[in-house]
């Protein structure tokens, strides 16, 4: 099978973060995957409350949840977002951390989270889960584009391919300095 050469173009940091924010605004629910080296993958739907200025994804979770337990064992995670009506998809590979910072919890609180935390942002056991992206890829299948929007400038954790399996996608790539602080 013959594959086409891929165009690689640089994009700026701000554009990548804005694209991630746009996808989360369209559909804030993602599949949050832990234990990436074990099959079956540990997957659950999660509501992303914010993509902060540094590009970190913020969620709320209970301190005793299976998610928090799994992050304590292995911080490498993957997030999968989809906007199927517009054929747009986003995958984030990165490192998760857990915080009990009450100020941050209050800052990102969303009334929809009350379904899981009935006492609001003061619910006992509530935590912030932050995912700092190391790699992010965005697919817009209507225009047949796959865009690598983040490629970590920190320690690489795995090798990535620069071609679409079919060889038709145009890839745009840019690097940003990642700040793992919220």
Image (cartoon, rainbow, N blue to C red):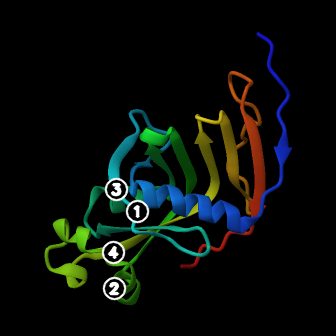
Which of the two discs, 2 and 1, labels the residue nearer the N terminus?
1
- Please, what secondary structure does the residue beneath circle 4 have? strand
Which of the two discs, 3 and 2, labels the residue nearer the N terminus?
3
For mark 4, what is the residue? 127
Q: Quadrant of residue 133?
A: bottom right
State the residue in front, 160 or 145.
Answer: 145
State the residue in front, 65 or 142.
Answer: 142
For mark 2, what is the residue? 106
Is residue 85 positioned above or below 111 on the image? above
Q: For the point 30% across and 74% down, which residue is it?
A: 110
- Please, what secondary structure does the residue beneath circle 2 have? helix
Dot 1 and dot 3 residues touching (CB under 8 Å)? yes
Find residue 46 and name its label: 3
For mark 1, what is the residue? 48
Q: Residues within 10 Å of mark 4 (few under 14, many from 20)?
A: many
- Please, what secondary structure does the residue beneath circle 3 have? strand
Q: Residues within 10 Å of mark 1 (few under 14, many from 20)?
A: many
Camera sees residue 50: yes
Is residue 101 positioned above or below 156 on the image? below
Q: Quadrant of the N terminus?
A: top right
Q: For the point 24% across and 74% down, which residue is it?
A: 111
Q: Quadrant of the C terminus?
A: bottom right
Dot 4 and dot 2 residues touching (CB under 8 Å)? no
Mark 4 to mark 2: distance in Å?
11 Å
Q: Quadrant of residue 17?
A: bottom right
């Amino acid at each position: 099978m013959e594959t086409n050469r891929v165009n690689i173009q640089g994009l700026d940091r701000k554009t990548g973060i804005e694209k991630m924010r746009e996808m989360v605004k369209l559909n804030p629910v993602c599949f949050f995957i832990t234990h990436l080296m074990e099959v079956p993958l540990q997957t659950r739907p999660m509501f992303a409350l914010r993509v902060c200025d540094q590009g970190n994804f913020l969620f709320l979770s209970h301190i005793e949840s299976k998610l928090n337990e799994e992050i304590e064992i292995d911080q490498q995670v993957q997030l999968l977002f989809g906007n199927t009506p517009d054929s747009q998809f986003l995958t984030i590979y990165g490192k998760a951390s857990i915080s009990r910072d009450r100020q941050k919890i209050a800052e990102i609180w969303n009334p929809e989270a009350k379904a899981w935390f009935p006492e609001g942002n003061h619910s006992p056991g509530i935590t912030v889960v932050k995912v700092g992206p190391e790699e992010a890829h965005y697919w817009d299948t209507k225009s047949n584009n796959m865009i690598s929007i983040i490629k970590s400038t920190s320690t690489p954790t795995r090798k990535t391919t620069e071609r679409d399996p079919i060889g038709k996608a145009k890839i745009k790539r840019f690097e940003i300095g990642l700040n793992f602080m919220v």
